[in-house]
Image (cartoon, rainbow, N blue to C red):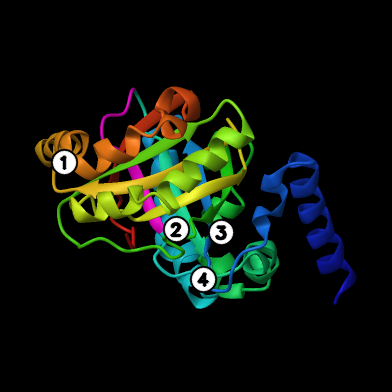
């Protein structure tokens, strides 16, 4: 292995270990073959000029290059109801943790990527392409180890983050999704989930994040109403160990719409 690659991988894996010390979550980077990892980026922008720079970068440079490296179905989204200038949400799937660790070095060696993305990659400090990027690394749930791309056409997406008071509460909520059938209830009721991910590195840990999709806001309201009254959900949620008051300390829901370049 080249020394630069070794040092980079060591620093990143070391950072992950330092963030997850003496925790059962520290073993989460190890995954069964076929389990995807996701990078969820949130671009904070100040104006439409920055929005166009970021969207053009993904359309012309990043998405083609990432697809070539094996990251298929890259999602790019804007907020459905932004407060001021929209943020841009980007979901990048990786086939393994090694792919995530090595992607930047491979992009740096891609001349076409650097040429197509130059206006974004080399934007001057006086006119940056974005204000800041928030980024999280997620591991797909056992019961849904790969992303499922929803149907094309007019649709909206809901990105939901469940925060937990403790790591043990987070593990119990994962159990509820994977083993107690919560993911199956979502699919049965037609929520069309895109992914479910445990946050390994990112803000507001411990938490899990997932994305579901609907035709429109009326469909969203109808689906959640059906979920709340579903007999299987009532049975699962009535189990004392699965009480939301014990497992979920805060829920953040963000409504999104796909950008023109989005592959999801």
Q: CA distance from mark 3 to mark 1?
A: 43 Å
For the record, the magenta segment spans 75-83
Asked if residue 11 can be seen in this view, the reply is: yes
Element assignment for label 4:
helix
* Residue carrying label 3: 118
Q: Nearer the viewer, mark 3 or mark 4?
A: 4
Element assignment for label 2:
helix
Q: CA distance from mark 3 to mark 4?
A: 14 Å
- Circle 3 packing at 10 Å, graded few (<14), some (14-19), many (20+), is few
Query: How many marks are shown on the rendered structure?
Result: 4
Q: Quadrant of the C terminus?
A: bottom left
- Circle 4 packing at 10 Å, graded few (<14), some (14-19), many (20+), is many
Residue at position x 43%, y 44% in the image: 176
Q: Earlier in the sequence, mark 3 or mark 1?
A: 3
Residue 46 is situated, as x and y percent measured from the top left of the image, at 45, 29
* Mark number, residue 58: 2
* Residue carrying label 1: 223
Residue 106 is situated, as x and y percent measured from the top left of the image, at 66, 71
Residue 258, relative to residue 99: is it above or below? above
Asked if labels 4 and 3 touch by Cβ distance under 8 angstroms, the answer is no
Residue at position x 38%, y 37% in the image: 160
* Residue carrying label 4: 65
- Circle 2 packing at 10 Å, graded few (<14), some (14-19), many (20+), is many
Residue at position x 53%, y 66% in the image: 35
Q: CA distance from mark 1 to mark 2?
A: 32 Å
Q: Quadrant of residue 4?
A: bottom right
């Amino acid at each position: 292995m080249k020394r630069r690659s070794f040092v980079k991988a060591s620093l990143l894996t070391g950072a992950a270990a330092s963030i997850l010390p003496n925790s059962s979550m520290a073993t989460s980077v190890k995954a069964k073959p076929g389990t995807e990892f996701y990078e969820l980026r949130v671009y904070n922008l100040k104006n439409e000029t920055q929005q166009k720079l970021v969207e053009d970068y993904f359309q012309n440079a990043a998405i083609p290059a990432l697809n070539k490296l094996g990251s298929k179905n890259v999602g790019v989204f804007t907020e459905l109801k932004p407060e001021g200038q929209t943020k841009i949400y980007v979901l990048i799937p990786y086939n393994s943790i090694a792919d995530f660790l090595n992607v930047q070095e491979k992009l740096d060696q891609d001349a076409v990527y650097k040429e197509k993305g130059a206006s974004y990659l080399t934007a001057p400090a006086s006119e940056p392409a974005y204000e800041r990027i928030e980024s999280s690394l997620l591991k797909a749930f056992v019961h849904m180890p790969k992303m499922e791309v929803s149907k094309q056409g007019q649709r909206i997406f809901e990105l939901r983050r469940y925060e937990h008071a403790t790591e043990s509460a987070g593990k119990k909520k994962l159990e509820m999704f994977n083993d107690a059938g919560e993911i199956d209830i979502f699919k049965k009721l037609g929520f069309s989930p895109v992914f479910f991910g445990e946050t390994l590195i990112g803000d507001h840990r411990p938490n899990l994040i997932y994305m579901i999709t609907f035709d429109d806001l009326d469909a969203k309201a109808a689906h959640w109403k059906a979920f709340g009254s579903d007999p299987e959900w009532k049975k699962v949620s009535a189990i004392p160990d699965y009480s939301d008051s014990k497992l979920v300390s805060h829920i953040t829901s963000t409504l999104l719409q796909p950008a023109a370049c989005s592959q999801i």
